[in-house]
Amino acid sequence: MRGGSADTSSIRGLTKSAILLLSLERDIAAAVMRQLDPDTIEEITREIAQVDRVSVETRGAVVEEFYNLALANQYVKQGGISYARQLLEKVLPSDQAAHVLKMIEHQVHKQPFSFLAKTDTENLTTFIQDEHPQTIALILSHLPTNKASEILSSLPAAKQVEVVARIARMDNTNPEVIKEVEQGLTLRLSGLVSQTYQKVGGVESVAEILNLADRSTEKGILEALEGQDPDLVEQIRRLMFVFEDIMLVNDKGIQSVLKEIDNEDLALALKTASPDLMDKIFRNMSERAAQLIKEDMEYMGPVRVSDVEAAQQKIVDVVRRLEDAGEIIISGRGGEKEMIV
């Protein structure tokens, strides 16, 4: 691949990422973005917004650099740095091969304690809080600032002061000392870092359990709990019935709900609805009303996800209110048992 000839050495990594994404087809760029963490997505999105005009040469050079890095990473995985060097020098000009290898070696020789960066903060704090303040200071000084701040805030007040003082006085540290501390932590925390935790319990579990309980049991539990913790009850209720669960409401119930919903809110809420749910909604409207909603959706244009979610929540609230009043039945939530045919 020899598409670009421009020099990219002066371009920031974040800017290169933005240029690369702008060079990809939109659906591919979106798929790549979904693999990134929220903070990185925010940074790259901001950078994309600031990118003005990029020459064809620069764009080609950035894409080529990415390709070469991906190729080099593949070689490293197959046989290590020396193997990658041998192959790269065969397929790339010597200056390009040296440039790519320099970046790869920087990735291989990672920042000290980098293995802790993705460890759960709460568990990590528990493990290191009894370490010597100098050790904690050494660890925090090598972690991302946001994570270091979270850990520092979780330490006892007296230790916070001592750790901060040691970080402030820290200058050059012997690499061997850093390596020794890192190896010791690696051994002690190997279980913590590599272990996969299974989430058990929580609000989601309560919502799932109550969804399967009969209506009287659900109401009794939530009413009793509401006196102790109304915010918790609201969290549970919002998880118990989500927008797509409207599929569980019978046609007569759908018609009752639609009487209380503004067309604007309905069109907005249906923007991300499944085809089955759209079909169910439109089946319970007049042909003319359904056509109007479809036209509103078509000409609405891009909308914020938060606005769609707010509109959906309005409809969910109406469904919950009508169910509580006994005016509609939701399949699978125990209401059928209370009916006499």
Image: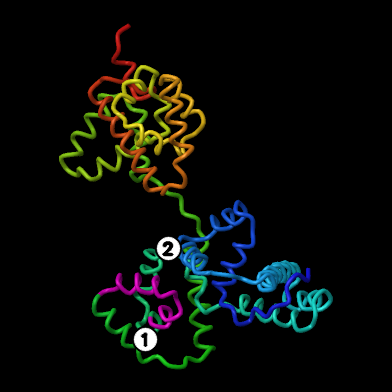
- The residue that mark 2 highlights is 120
Q: Label 1: few (<14), some or many (≥20) within 10 Å?
A: some
Position in image of residue 12 (x %, y %) = 56, 77
At 51% from the left edge and 74% from the top edge, which residue is drawn? 114
Residue 152 part of the magenta-drawn span? yes
Q: CA distance from mark 2 to mark 1?
A: 22 Å
Instruction: Tell which of 256 and 94 is nearer to you.
Output: 256
Please state which amino acid type lies under the numbered disc 1: Ile
User: Residue 69's x, y, as percent?
Assistant: 69, 71
The magenta-colored residue range is 137-156
Q: Quadrant of the C terminus?
A: top left
Place of residue 200 in the rendered image (x, y in percent of width and height, measured from the top left): 40, 46
* Residue 150 magenta: yes
Q: Quadrant of residue 314?
A: top left
Give amino acid for label 2.
Answer: Asp
Find residue 167 and name its label: 1
**Few, some or many residues within 10 Å of mark 2 (<14, 14–19, 20+):** few
